[in-house]
Every structure is written in C-alpha cells, then in structure tokens.
C-alpha cells in the first residue's frame, strides 16, 4: 500500500496530517489472488459435495424432475419443426399459393399434428407389440 501525507502550515505544531491510503493494484498479484480464491471456493464446494453426496443427489433429482417437462417440450418442438417446415414449404405452399403466411403456418401445424398422431398410432399398433413379444421370448 502506498500512503500519501498531506500537511498544511509552517510550524511542526500546527501540522495537520491527513493520511490517505491508496491501494497499489498490481495486475499480476491481483490475478493470482483471484485465481487462488476461485480454487479455494471450488475445493470447498467439491469437498462438501462429496461429503453430502446423498443430499446432492436428491437435490439433483429434484432439479431434473422440475426441468423434465421443459426438456420434453423443447425436444418435441425441435423434432416436429422439421415436419412442420417440410409441410409448410412443399405441401401447403404448393396447394395454396395465394394464401397468407399465417394461414399456411396454421394448416402446416394441423397437418403436422395429424401426421405425428398417425405415426404414433401405427407404432403402437404394429411395431410395439412385436418388440414386446421379442423381449418376452428372450427373457
């Protein structure tokens, strides 16, 4: 630390001494200190997570249970987007060239939902029973 002494007056008796403290920030040592603090914090966090693993796993499972509907929703939206773009660009736009953009999008969504419902129905009707039967034979 660097100190600055400010004094007024000529006599040594009347000196008013005001000491201002300034911190001499050295980038090298400041960076080392910040990294040391980060390492200590992560070390303590790792130690506590190892020592309290059951509580940590319970907290993690609760967090995942909360996020699960969002993950499923985003995944379905991502997968259905390919079918939606295909039906919008290739099928509905060619069938109704003069239609508005919102109408084309709406009809594409309806067609996408119908196609996905049919695909899920066909999967459970034909493929799922055969897979279940094969698993039963293996066991």
Image (spheres, rainbow, N blue to C red):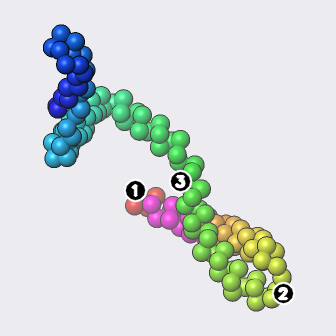
Res 128 → quadrant: bottom right
The residues tagged by marks 2 and 1 sit, at their Cα atoms, a distance apart of: 58 Å
* Mark number displayed over residue 71: 3
Name the residue beneath numbered marker 1. Answer: 139
Can the viewer see residue 118?
no
| Residue extent of the magenta highlight | 124-135
Q: Going from the N terminus, do you reach mark 2 or mark 1 first?
A: 2
Give SS at disc 1: loop
Predominant secondary structure in magenta?
Answer: helix
Instruction: Report x, y in % for residue 24.
Output: 19, 38
The residues tagged by marks 2 and 3 sit, at their Cα atoms, a distance apart of: 37 Å
Q: Is residue 134 magenta?
A: yes
Residue mark closest to the camera, 2 vs 1:
2
Give SS at disc 3: helix
Image quadrant occupied by the N terminus: top left
Instruction: Report x, y in % for residue 65.
Output: 51, 41
Furthest-top residue in this view: 13
Q: Is residue 79 magenta?
A: no
Instruction: Report x, y in % for residue 78.
Output: 57, 66
Which residue is located at x 21 percent, y 40 percent? 25
Name the residue beneath numbered marker 2. Answer: 98
Out of 100 and 80, give the one closest to the viewer.
100
């Amino acid at each position: 630390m660097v100190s600055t002494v400010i004094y007024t007056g000529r006599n040594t008796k009347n000196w008013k001494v005001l000491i201002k403290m300034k911190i001499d920030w050295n980038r090298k040592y400041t960076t080392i200190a910040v990294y040391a603090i980060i390492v200590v914090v992560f070390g303590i966090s790792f130690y506590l997570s190892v020592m309290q693993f059951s509580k940590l796993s319970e907290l993690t499972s609760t967090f995942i249970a909360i996020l699960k509907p969002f993950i499923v929703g985003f995944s379905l939206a991502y997968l259905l987007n390919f079918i939606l773009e295909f039906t919008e660009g290739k099928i509905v736009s060619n069938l109704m060239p003069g239609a508005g953009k919102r109408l084309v999008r709406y009809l594409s969504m309806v067609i996408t939902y119908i196609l996905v419902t049919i695909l899920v129905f066909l999967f459970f009707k034909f493929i799922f029973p055969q897979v279940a039967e094969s698993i039963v034979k293996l066991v």
